[in-house]
Amino acid sequence: MADTCVFCRIAAGELPARVVYRDDQAVAFHDLNPQAPVHVLVVPLDHHVDLSTAEPPLLGHLLHLCAALAAELGLEEGHRVVVNTGVDGGQTVGHLHLHLMGGRFMRWPPG
């Protein structure tokens, strides 16, 4: 665990979060700054800086979890899964995380 990583601290239970799911590989919780009516972050428990440091089985688990949570959270009409990577990609926390968003029409480009 990275001692200063906010997502590691949430995963360890050191910081509060509105958790919607937890298993032995990941935790999912509501984003503090939602960009859609439903905006959940899906975060691996182990620290991975971004997509480049995670193995395919973990990435598959995170994507499968997004699909399962979308169904559970009532996003049958559609949803978006976003992974920001690096500063230029918009990543603001240096811990791999997937944004699961829905509950409204998700236009492109966003805004």
Image: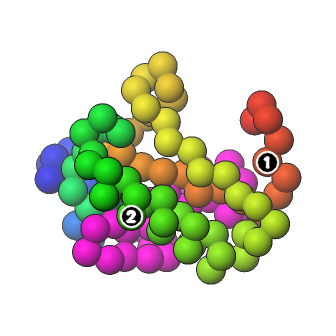
Colour mapping used in the image: rainbow
Q: Say which mark, if any, is on residue 26.
A: none
Note whether residue 13 is visible: yes
Note whether residue 5 is visible: no
Considering depth in this image, is 12 or 22 the residue closer to the camera?
Answer: 22
Q: Residue at x 43, y 23 (%)?
A: 87
Seen in the picture, residue 88 relative to 31 is either above or below; the reply is above
Q: Residue at x 26, y 49 (%)?
A: 55
Expressed as whole percent of the image width and height from the top left, the position of residue 67 reads 57, 67
For residue 68: magenta? no
Considering depth in this image, is 49 or 30 the residue closer to the camera?
Answer: 49
Span shown in magenta: 16-42
Q: Say which mark, if any, is on residue 61.
A: 2
Expressed as whole percent of the image width and height from the top left, the position of residue 26 reads 33, 66
Considering depth in this image, is 27 or 61 the residue closer to the camera?
Answer: 61
Expressed as whole percent of the image width and height from the top left, the position of residue 39 reads 62, 58
Seen in the picture, residue 109 relative to 20 is either above or below; the reply is above
- The Cα–Cα distance between marks 1 and 2, rounded to whole angstroms, is 24 Å
Q: Residue at x 32, y 44 (%)?
A: 95
* Nearest-to-viewer mark from 1 and 2: 2
- Is residue 71 left or right of 37 when viewed as pictured? left
Expressed as whole percent of the image width and height from the top left, the position of residue 98 reads 48, 51
Local secondary structure at mark 2: helix
Local secondary structure at mark 1: loop
- Is residue 68 left or right of 9 when viewed as pictured? right
Seen in the picture, residue 100 relative to 53 is either above or below; the reply is below
> What residue type is disc 1 on?
Met
